[in-house]
Image (cartoon, rainbow, N blue to C red):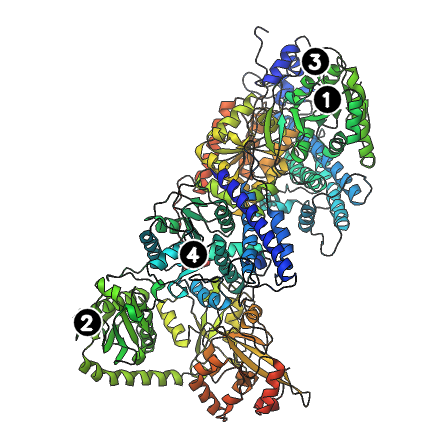
Amino acid sequence: MSKIIATAAIRGAHETVDLAEAKIKEAIDSKGPSHEVAFPNTGYFLPVIYALTGEKVEKVSDMEKILKIAKDLLPEEPADKLWLPYLGNTLDAGIATLFGAEMIMALRYIGIGDPPVNDLYLGAADDVIMRARGVEFVDGSAPGFAAVVGAAPTNEEAVAIARELQGKNLYIFMAGSTNGRCIADQLAEEGVQLGWETRLVPFDPHVYGQIYSVGFATRAAMSFGGVQPGDYKRTLSYNKNRIFAFVMALGEVDPIKYAAAAGAISYGFPTIADTDIPEILPTGVCTYEHVVSNVPRDKIVQKSIEVRGLKIKVDKIDIPVAYSAAFEGERIRKDDLYIEFGGSKTECFEFLSMKDMEEVEDGKIEVIGPQVADMPEKSRLPLAVVVDVAGRKMQKDFEPILERQLHHMVNGAEGVMHIGQRDTAWIRIGKKAVEKGFSLADFGKIFHAKLMSDFPAIVDKVQVKIITDQEQVSALMPEARKAYAERDERVAGLTDNSVDIFYSCTLCQSFAPKHVCIISPQRLGLCGAYNWLDGKASYEINPTGPNQPVDKGALIDEEKGEWIGINEYLAKATQGNVEKLYAYSIMENPMTSCGCFEAIVAHLPLMDMETGDIRSGFMVVNRDYPGMTPFGMSFSTMAGLVGGGVQTPGLMGIGKYYVTSEKFVSADGGFARLVWLPKDLKEALRPLLEKQCERIGDPSFLDKVGDETVATTMEELAVFLKSVNHPVMQMDPLM
Amino acid sequence: MTEERKKSIDPAALEMLERAAGFSTMFSRADEMKPCNFGAEGSCCRACAMGPCRLATTKDGKEKRGVCGATLATVAARNFARQVAIGSAAHSDHGRNVAKTFLAAAKGEAAGYEIKDVGKLNWLAGFMEIPTEGRTVQEIAIDVGEKALAGFGKQDDTPHVFVKAAPKKRQEIWEKYNVFPRGVDREIIELLHSSHAGNDQDAEHITTHLVRACLADGWGGSMTATHLQDILFGTPKPLTAEANLGVLKEDEVNVVIHGHEPLLSEKIVDAASDPELIKYAESKGAKGINLSGVCCTANEVLMRRGVNSAGNVLQAELAIMTGVVDAMVVDVQCVFQGIESVTSKYHTKLVTTNERMRITGATHMQFEEHNAEENARAIIKMAIDNYKNRKGEIHIPQYKSPLVAGFSNEYIRYMLGGKLRASFRPLNDAIISGRIQGAAAIVGCNNPRTVHDESIMYLVKEFIKNNVLVVTTGCAAIAAGKHGYMQPEMMEQAGEGLREICEAVGIPPVLHLGSCVDNSRVLTILTEVVNEGGLGEDISDLPAIGIAPEWYSEKALTIAIYAVASGASVIFGGVGSPVKSSKEVTRLITEGYEEKFGARFDFIPDKEGIFAAAMDHIHKKRKALGIDKQQERVLFDMEMRRELSV
């Protein structure tokens, strides 16, 4: 009965808060009260505490206040007889446990307690991971996560559960042990690839490590949902209605696990257990039941999904290996390799083109040349993947979009790896996949099934040729390359002025209700995942979907990029939140941001130390760069200032390729004002950036743009810019 | 009288009644005094000196008219209007008294009173559109007190400040029939005025118009009392106590408080635990001071302070007959003169404390908010001094039952989700899923003309067995407590669905919401349930019903009307309808109210009939909501999630 859970959870909460108190004391004694404490690379402090209380824990002594809050939440255990109501108390105890656990885990990062990262355990996810992975929660490619606590009785069952969860595209966050073993240990022993790439994430052997799961979900609410720190109601209802997570308890449930589960319930995350613990079946805090127990392990994944209220669309493809987005990040290492194609060792390309209806025989899959089974282990073959697509609403413009999907489609197969695209494609098939009978024809099956199911509005027929015959591959290659070049030219020719229609993107409105992206040919979506053509295709595929055509309407200001139609659309779509957009400006009426931007542009007021003049430069920082920027903050901290669908002049989230656009903040002086980029980003975009330099008539301009090797403060940067004679030092300031 | 009729199902009451043989009690007088049918059924008009007129109906169904020409319908409706006006006056005057004390406390003019629940003060201030930002508790409290007090004497035609707490749809209905309450006093005076001879003589209009004074009670006077009492004395949250005559202690000074207002009794609770006074009691040979209550004062201090209840209203006389009650301290309402004649046979000091209520032969010690502490201490001291005067045989029936009380709407929200997720969602879900079929508010009094506690307990047991959550107030609540149904263990007596909810939350199947003034909590809860969503748009959509199985008072009638006008149907049991003589008025308060307010007021004497009608009502409402069948589990994909609000 529930009273048993309440009693155990409240006891576990007391133990947790007591432990936190002891650890805080230990930290104060050994490190001093003003010792800094933080999770790595995050702008959200101790995120659960920050979101639910609004309190920033930055140093050890800040924890004392949180400890008091946690203690005030701690109730007494219910009496044996004539007990007082305990549900509310238990949920409070759960929250106190989260606070305690988050402090205990944070203290590990300053050497109090076990090391936070060890062996296969990854510790807390930083903001880079949270933002990159969070996007998948936003667009639905990851429908939720399973917080798995404990271990299965056998490794075999552990692997089966993990695979089944992966098969549902779920993330699996692992922390907590049964008899000293965590499911992550079991998976590792069985050689299952763990890590964010495979969605099998081992946080920590202790159940307190599940605070990272809760922290991940909490930061998603703040960064994507624009939930304000301290707004505990919205934090929790956001998680209940957006982040479809659940706790899977394998093996014995002790008081501390109960206490953590009680914390999860406040987030709307129910617990499903394989042992015979008491149940809480009535609904209301979670969407459905709160605790369901005694579920057989071969049914536990299905039951968990049902209890959480999740509907998951799973692609059923008739191939001999499992298929799911969760397998996309899987690597095939040398030792596991059976056969590979491309990767600059053999010729390999993928080419998808549109054909007339009568030219395509739907479902036809031809394999020409040697088969996988004909080849010995660790061999290589050339490969041409030729996909013909027909559809009444298919357009030439959609060819590259569909073709780019081939990468994801191949990757979804368990034991198969795909990198690159077009003529840089590189495919590896692992031994295990071949053992299970995976063949080249299965690529055809995947392409057919996925193109038909993912793009039903534009694709009616698909036929596939898989060619491994060297002669034929070489013969077809030039034709494909010609088509690639034509496509590039066509895209390059698309400008904001050459089209009448832009596309909106509200894909993340479920997460960021106030934000709307406007995608134009010269400015891609800030997540970097959607350009104008994608928007167009997406609209054709789903006319009521998140990408809607927006008629630019009459031009108001060409330089600033303001159109009547865009303003009107935004005013309506944001319920008056944004009434005016200057598409090419960061300083005035800039585009808003959700939380999933690839990079941030920021205005830097730079002082010329000799003249005392203030100059206006722009820096760009991408989310993979963890270090300090001249803005005085790291990306994570800056990101906290940008999101939430609010116009913030001087700061803006962008897709990183926007830096290479002619229209890059062109109303404010544009590319010529670019003064700082992280080195890695500069290198990654170098060819395109060099084109921009040529366009502004300064081929060596890129060398004048600073990076972290020359400056990480505004002062250093100003000195550097002056020394290289950066044009910005002669331009009028913007403010 | 051929055979002794069954008087009670309470073993403590029965034991005392057996000992009281020969004494005149309310039970015996009810047998001796037959009710006058004309009075009981509303056909006696005493509105002027042309009468009184007894408007009998002839055997062939012809209705007589009064000297003035008034029809039976007019007379029955008018008598009824006067009854509910008095009921509303009683609750509302209580509310005014609380508001006055509240304001005095806020101004620092009532020593010993303070603002205990600042959270609720801020919430109420926000609701009343009183600024809180950057202001002291005292400043806010003064504004709240003044505005609350102004609600009584308000003369303009705008709605009372609490009206907007009702569901939107309900407010529109009140607007449509022009019954939304304005100033509380005004509505009562207006109703009394219109009941003067030669005034309102249209039964349909009278029965509609009288709603206004009743709503002025429920959403005005009573709600003011509940809110301000909570702020002043603390919003109730669960606590344990015991109920029935067995709580009296032979070797301690027993002080029993009786009546309705907590203003003085709160201070008496403080005084009774004062170490100095305890020491004084010990110096007089007692082992301590044992405070308990009967009727609704008991409920007030039970809900907030965990003071034991010695019983409900019919047990006041019986408590005195134990011979151990050293003082019975009374304030207002439902304190019957018969008590005095019993006290005079024992040593018990009967102390009246309120200017509105004196009893010949009792000691009066006027309570004023500025001398409350002093007053309370003097009363306790008097009781202690009286300890040595006990005379005659002492007999305390050894019956009492532990209970959990203290359910405010605020706590119910909390208990369903904790501090961070407090909401009514789990309750609504439970109703939608059918675990809980509906809710029955079993409220009101006891009446010596019915078997004491019998109907109340029959209904409690049947409802919970049939998965209907029971909430109770007043003397009905004390009955449930005495009979053990407020123990969480009693979930075992509930149907499977209700038991699951009780088990998940840790509650008894019967929730004690407080005194009869706290029926305003029921209104708030019903509104919160509507606002939570999924169960229609108005209180009248809910599978909920109010029942007073053993009513006796005019206040009960007023409560019934404000509940009905708020959309909750009500059934009264036991004695008959006060408008029974007129078919037309009976139609107006049943079908007539149902057409206007979506709820009706029925009188069904027998408990089985009440239960059947109530279940029928609940099933009909469930069907109308489309929740009479098992709901399919909805699984959410991304698209559907985007529709969910965050």
Q: Quadrant of residue B286?
A: top right
Label 1 and label 3: CA atoms lie apart by 13 Å
Which mark, residue A174? 4
> What residue type is disc 2 on?
Pro
**Side of B245 relative to A309 (left or right):** right
Q: Are marks 1 and 3 on the same chain?
A: yes
> What residue type is disc 1 on?
Glu
Judged by depth in the image, the label closer to the viewer, 1 or 2, is: 2
Label 1 and label 4: CA atoms lie apart by 62 Å
Host chain of mark 3: B
Host chain of mark 1: B
For disc 2, the marked residue is A376
**Side of B537 relative to B313 (left or right):** left
For disc 3, the marked residue is B394
Identify whether B387 is placed above or below B584.
above
How many other residues sit within 10 Å of disc 2, few (<14), some (14-19) or many (≥20)? few
How many other residues sit within 10 Å of disc 4, few (<14), some (14-19) or many (≥20)? many
Tell me the quadrant of the picture where the C terminus of chain A can be found: bottom right
Q: Are marks 3 and 4 on the same chain?
A: no
> What residue type is disc 3 on?
Ile
Judged by depth in the image, the label closer to the viewer, 1 or 4, is: 4
Q: Residue at x 62, y 53 (%)?
A: A67
How many other residues sit within 10 Å of disc 1, few (<14), some (14-19) or many (≥20)? many
Q: Secondary structure at mark 3?
A: loop
Which mark, residue B252? 1
Dot 1 or dot 3, earlier in sequence:
1
